[in-house]
Structure formats: structure tokens, C-alpha cells
Image: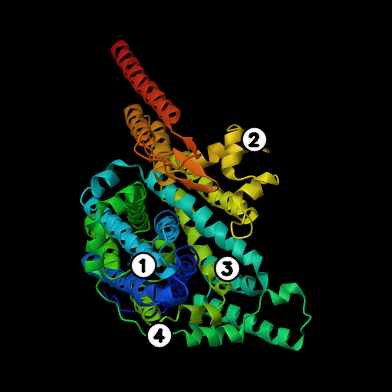
Amino acid sequence: MSYPLFVRRDLDGFFGLFIDNLVQLLLIVALCSTQCGMAGEANQLLYQRILPGAAISIVLGNLFYAWQAHQLAKKTNRSDVTALPYGINTPSLLVYVFFVMGPVYRQAVERGASSTEAANLAWQMGLVACIGSGVIEFLGAFIAEPIRRCTPRAALLSTLAGIAIGFISMTFALQIFQKPLLAMLPLGIVLIVYFSHSKFPWHLPGGLIAVISGTVVAWLLTGVQGLWPSAPSWIMNSTMSIANVKNAIATTQWSLPHFYGSELWQTLQQPGTWLVHLSVIIPMGLFNLIGSLQNIESAEAAGDRFPTAPSLAANGIGTMSAALFGSCFPTTIYIGHPGWKALGARAGYSTLNGLVITLICCTGTVAVIQSLIPIESGVAIVLWIGIVITAQAFTATPAEHAPAVAIGLFPAIAAWGQTVVQGAFMSAFDFTKTSESDFLAHGGNTMQTILTANPQAEVNGFLLHGLLSLERGYIFTCMFLASIAASLIDRKFYAASGWSLLAAIFAAVGLTHAFQLQGNIVDFLFPTSTPPAGSYLFQATPIAIGYLLMSALFLWFGRYRSDANSSEQSTD
């Protein structure tokens, strides 16, 4: 048996994983610049600290999971093992920017700090949030395997399928039809290669051809625009800019990672500054842990059984190393292993991704790549990954558990819907152009004003309160609902009762369903939380009671069935 360092199809896997990671880097640059003041003089925090720190965590994780794949191939004498995909965790990135770093920056500015000083404080608090998530992920590695053994596979995979539908497939499908000139030709190439399992001439990787084709089209349209200044908007919206390329090249700089343990330790010695953020750090650490656990289960369903504890421990170590070397953003085992495996990727795609992302982060060339290659040229590859994950949830579980998989999709779909709704409200209300009081005085609404006026408001089936409630802690809720359903399908009524009881506990302590809403900003609501004045609050007590009633019902019915079976056996 030969398990090579690199195979031809690793290029396909690399382009998909690379684009996924590149999107996270672009998000970091955009959000930290606009929300945390890391622009102008403060952009050194981005290009000299955060991105090089992210490089450390990404290269360590990718190399470890590539090595792990080699070990599994050697142990099982197989040549088709695919490494676990790995990169920056998108939900944590968004949550830490909007609910930890952004608020710290704004509060510091309000207290009179300069923008640069406030950005530095936001960065330090981001390091605390990142190290906290890493500690939770690392410690959870030693208790995760029992959780995995007692959780139905339908529950673990349906959560991933829901995320794949909403946050991968739908998002990238919308991008394709947003700029069809750039994205539909690459989509056709991806459909040929991965749906028909056919090969292009000279066995060229489909992912490479897709990215090249989309890039060539974009630059051809740029030439058309130069020759035809009054070109239609659908051409103008699909062009690139030579000026952007020049500006991006001018900003490149070589920045090696540095150890920032002392800065992190100084911040940790001031508990008054970070204890208030535990209501964000703890849930996100748990979400990352459970999400990685689900991805390991997904890999096993695809044929590659990796040990749980080392996989999750490496994940936690990667996140902690990110914080120690300057990055504020946790890393995680990515969703999508079955997709990479279906592409024919092995371990080389992980190694190559780690090395290339490291080079980009340490040279500050993120903007250069963005200016040269339209992101739409590669989204079809990631769309394929989402499709495979969704299909796997149904094909890798017992056929009778299909309804359990289906019910587990709903909370994740609600989470995607919440991001769309929140984006629409935020687009309608721009703080930079008008004050909130003026906006409301002229008939404008935020999500908070709508729910305050009528929590039961319904428009064409749109229930805002129910959407937000189902979205909070959706990773847990997906698991609970699917586990309850799978247990009932198997007539394990006591197990269904136990899962319902656990769901009640999570709702009661605020890990699921409870939320606080200020304007259009949604956050968790724990019993110990101190919400801002005027916020719309929803403690999930009634939902917890509902879960308790379900638990009691299943417990009673289990005993009833047991007694009925005993009576039937006695009669026989």
C-alpha cells in the first residue's frame, strides 16, 4: 500500500479549502477594520499581529491533520484516507467581533481613548476570548467520546446538514446568481467533474479549471469595460480593477508571528474587564467543541475513523496557539470532510492549504489575491461540499431515521434565516447616516421595536420571536430534536425522555432559546446577565417547561409500553 504525500485530486481539495479559509481572512480584515477600529495607523494590529497569529494556528492544525491521515492510512493499510479539513471558525469570528471586540472598542472611544488605543484594547480582549474557547475545546476533548457514543448519528449529522444548507449551500448559491457571468461557468465545470465523475483532458483538476475560468472571464469583462465605458450594469458589476491590484500590492509587508503571552496575561490579571464576556466565550467554546465532534462523526460516516480525543485536543491547541501568537479567532475542524473525500483529496490538500495560508498571512497578500481572483470563481466548489454534507446526513444514517435528520435541520435553517433578517434590518437602518431616534420617529422599525410592540406579530407566516428563539443555541437544539426523534423511532422512550430533560436544562440556563435584543443586535440571555436598559428580553422558561412536559410524557409512555409488553408476555 502506498499513501503518497500528494495526489492530483489534492489540488481540487486545496482550492475548495483555500477559498473557504480565504473568505475567513477577508472577513477578519473587513470586520476588524470597520467594527474594531483596526484601520489607518491601527491596521498593524491586523497585518502584524492577528493574521500572522492566525497563520501559526492554521499551519499547525493542517499539518497535524495531514499527519493524522498518514497514520490512519498506515494503520488500516488504505490509500484513500482523507485528512480532516481545518481552519478559522466562522461563527466565532462573527460573534467575537460583534459581541466582544466591537463593544470594547466603542466603550473605550466613549471613555476618551484614541481610536488606536481602543483598537488595541479590543485586540487584547479578543485574545482572552480566543484562549477561553481553546481551553474549553481542549478540556472537552477528554469527555467528548462518551457524548459521541450515546448520541444518535442522525443527531450529529443533521446538525451539519442544516449548517451546510443555510451557511454554505444557500449563501454560495446566492453568490453564484448574484454575479452569474463570473460564477456560472465555474459552476458548470464543477457539475461536470463532481456530479458526472468525468475527467477533463489531461486529467486537469476541475477545481483549478473552475477558478481559472472565472478569473479569465472577470478580466476579459474588465477589458470590455475599458473599450465600452457605457457598458450595461451587469457587465460593470462583474469586472476587476487594475487600480485595486496596484493598491493591494503597495500594502504588502512581511510580518513574522510574535509571542504575545505577556499581553494576554496582563489582560487576564484584570478579571473585571473580561468576566462580563464569559456569557459569550463559554457558549462559543461549547459550540466549537460540539461542532468539531459532529465533523469527526461525519468523517467516520464517510469511511475515515479518526480518534476523537487527539483530534479535538489538537483543535483546542490550535486555538490556544492562535491567541498566544496574536490572533483573536478560534480555529476548528471544518465541516465538509465527505465532500473533500468525494473530490479525491487525501492529505496533501491539507498540507498545501496550511502552507499557502501561512504565506498569505505573513506577507499581507490577502488583499492582492482578492483583487486578482474573484471569489465567485471558486464558490461552486464550496457549494458542492455543502451538497455532499446534506446528502450524507440521509445516506449515512439508517433509512428509518430520515425523519429525525429532517427535524434536526429546522434550527439551523432558522439560524440562517435570522442572519438574513438581521442583515435586512441593519441595511434599512444605518447608524452612520441617521440617529436611532430620528429613524424611529420617521416610522422606521428595528427588530426590538417590532417585538416590543407585539411579540406575537405575524406577517405571511413570518414569526420574528419564534425565529430568534429557535436560532439561539441552534447547534444544541438540532442535536436535541434529532436525538429525541431518533429515540422515538427506535421506541427508546426513556432515552427520548432523557434528551428532553437535557434540552430543558439547556433552555433554563440560557444556552438555548433565550435571547436579549437591543435594536437589531441579538445576544444570549443567561440568568446572570445584566441586559442594557430598554432591551427586549426572553427567558426561555416556558420552552424549558415544554421540554419537561415532553420528558414526563415520554417517561410515562415508556413505562406504559413496558407494562403492556409484560402483560402480553404473561398472557402468551
SS under mark 4: loop
**Whole-percent x, y for residue 210 in the image:** 55, 76
Q: Is residue 554 left or right of residue 140?
A: right
Tag 3's secondary structure? helix
Residue that carries the numbered disc 1 in the rendered image = 120
Residue 452 lies, in percent from the top left, at 57, 35
What residue does disc 3 label? 191
Mark 2 surroundings: few (<14), some (14-19) or many (≥20) residues within 10 A: few
Q: Which residue appears at 40% of the width and 44% of the height?
A: 154
Residue furthest right in the image: 230
Looking at the rendered structure, the kind of residue marked 3 is Leu
Q: Residue at x 60, y 45 (%)?
A: 446
Image marks 4 and 1: residues in contact by CB distance under 8 Å: no
**Numbered tag placed on residue 458 in the rendering:** 2
The answer to whether mark 2 and mark 4 are in CB contact below 8 A is no
Q: Amino acid at mark 1?
A: Asn
Which residue is painted at 36% across and 56% down in the image?
A: 295
Q: Nearer the viewer, mark 2 or mark 4?
A: 4
Q: How is the image coloured?
A: rainbow
Quadrant of residue 137 in the image? bottom left
Label 1 or label 2, whichever comes before in sequence order? 1
Q: Circle 1 — which element?
A: helix
Residue 243 appears in the rendering: yes
State which tag comes first along the sequence, 3 or 1: 1
Mark toward the start of the polypeptide (2 vs 4): 4
Check disc 2 and give the amino acid type.
Glu
Which residue lies under the disc numbered 4?
Answer: 253
